[in-house]
Amino acid sequence: MVILFNKPFGVLSQFTPEGGHRALDEFGFPAGVYAAGRLDHDSEGALLLTDDGRLIKQLLDPKNAHPRTYLAQVEMEGVQIVYTASGHAKWHARYCLITQRKCESYSSFE
């Protein structure tokens, strides 16, 4: 079984509450499913849950290196920064400073 869950802000990517934060146990998932990865409690987005241990190992074990891409969006008053990172052994990242709905500056770094 594979479940794609839109994890809300403020919820841990684990089934046990900790540090006063909400956890996955309150969403009524079937017994035996686990998160295949994690998102910080102060982020939101797609979280894969499954009861397939082989799939979790294939996705998370560093021995099975495969490309991964992350997108993070940071918003401050009047400024928006979009950050992406991807790679296997070596990480490449880039960001774009967006003001008034267009990219004002673009940078890339390793």
Image: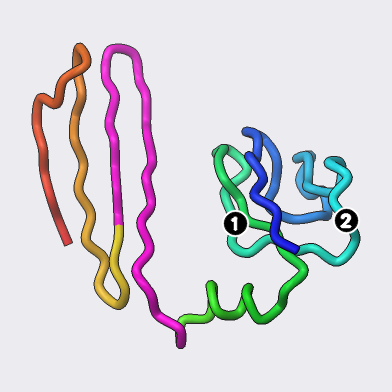
| Image location (x, y in percent) of residue 39 | 57, 50
Is residue 78 inside the magenta stretch?
Answer: yes
| Image location (x, y in percent) of residue 5 | 67, 45
Q: Quadrant of the N terminus?
A: bottom right
Q: Residue at x 38, y 52 (%)?
A: 70
Q: How is the image coloured?
A: rainbow
| Image location (x, y in percent) of residue 38 | 59, 56
Q: Residue at x 29, y 42 (%)?
A: 83
Residue at which label 2 appears:
30
The image quarter in which residue 69 lies:
bottom left
**Mark 1 or mark 2, which is nearer the start of the sequence?**
2
Disc 2 or disc 1, which is closer to the eye? Answer: 2
Q: Give the residues drawn in magenta, as a range.
A: 63-85
**Element marked by disc 1:** loop
Residue situated in front as seen by the camera: 79 or 5: 5
Query: Quick check: marks 2 and 1 in contact, CB under 8 Å?
Result: no
**Amino acid type, residue under disc 2 in the picture:** Pro
| Image location (x, y in percent) of residue 41 | 63, 43
Residue at which label 1 appears:
38
Q: Residues within 10 Å of mark 1 (few under 14, many from 20)?
A: some
Q: Residue at x 9, y 31 (%)?
A: 105
Q: Is residue 15 left or right of residue 36?
A: right
Q: Is residue 38 left or right of residue 14?
A: left
Q: Quadrant of the C terminus?
A: bottom left
The image quarter in which residue 81 lies:
top left
**Amino acid type, residue under disc 1 in the picture:** Arg
The image shows a total of numbered marks equal to: 2
Q: Is residue 36 above or below residue 28?
A: below
Q: Residue at x 34, y 69 (%)?
A: 67
